[in-house]
Image (tube, rainbow, N blue to C red):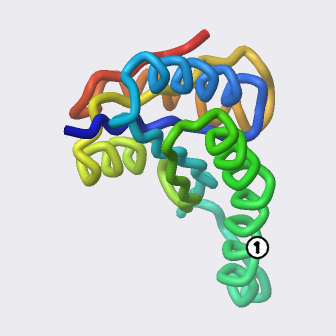
């Protein structure tokens, strides 16, 4: 029986701490453990945009997803492979807590691992108040790494 652990990553130091902890768990669990690395580019439907921005929106979204895959997911998967840990990765666009929980349900995951961060910028938005929402609404246990 396999054990899947969802890991929220974003390329920041906080995300790297979550990945390190998940790698340790995978090593303890053994060969049947799979880490599902998830990088989410947050999207807000409540921003007002010009017609020109709307016309470029799909292209910009795809560029963001491609950049996150190249900058975050691919290097992390390579590190897992080198450590002998099974892993998959995906980059999505949307609401972080909702998507992490949805993936956990979809993959029948044992838990979700994310990091709490006091840093500013993207990691704060991704792992700041979103963490509290995820902990309260997740269908599986959530481990928050400091």
In percent of the image, x 48 and y 50: which residue is there?
95
* Label 1 CA crowd tier, 10 Å (few <14, some 14–19, many 20+): few
Query: To which quarter of the image does residue 128 belong?
Result: top right
Taking depth in this image into account, of 52 and 73 the one nearest to the observer is: 73
In percent of the image, x 71 and y 90: which residue is there?
55
- Which structural element holds mark 1? helix
In percent of the image, x 55 and y 54: which residue is there?
89
Q: Is residue 144 left or right of residue 56?
A: left
Residue 12, image x, y percentages = 77, 32
In percent of the image, x 74 and y 65: which residue is there?
64
Q: Quadrant of the N terminus?
A: top left
Residue 96, image x, y percentages = 49, 45
- Residue farthest to the top? 146
Q: Is residue 4 left or right of residue 86?
A: left
Query: To which quarter of the image does residue 41 belong?
Result: bottom right
Q: Which residue is mark 1?
A: 63
Taking depth in this image into account, of 49 and 111 the one nearest to the observer is: 111
Residue 131, image x, y percentages = 48, 25
Q: Quadrant of the C terminus?
A: top right
């Amino acid at each position: 029986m396999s054990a899947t652990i969802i890991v929220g990553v974003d390329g920041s130091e906080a995300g790297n701490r979550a990945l390190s902890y998940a790698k340790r768990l995978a090593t303890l669990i053994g060969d049947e453990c799979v880490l599902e690395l998830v990088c989410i580019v947050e999207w807000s439907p409540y921003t007002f945009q010009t017609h020109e921005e709307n016309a470029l929106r799909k292209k910009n979204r795809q560029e963001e997803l491609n950049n996150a895959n190249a900058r975050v997911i691919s290097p992390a998967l390579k590190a897992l492979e080198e450590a002998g840990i099974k892993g998959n990765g995906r980059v999505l666009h949307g609401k972080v807590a909702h998507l992490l929980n949805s993936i956990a349900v979809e993959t029948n995951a044992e838990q979700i691992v994310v990091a709490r961060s006091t840093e500013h910028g993207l990691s704060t938005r991704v792992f700041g108040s979103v963490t509290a929402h995820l902990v309260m609404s997740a269908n599986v246990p959530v481990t928050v790494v400091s």
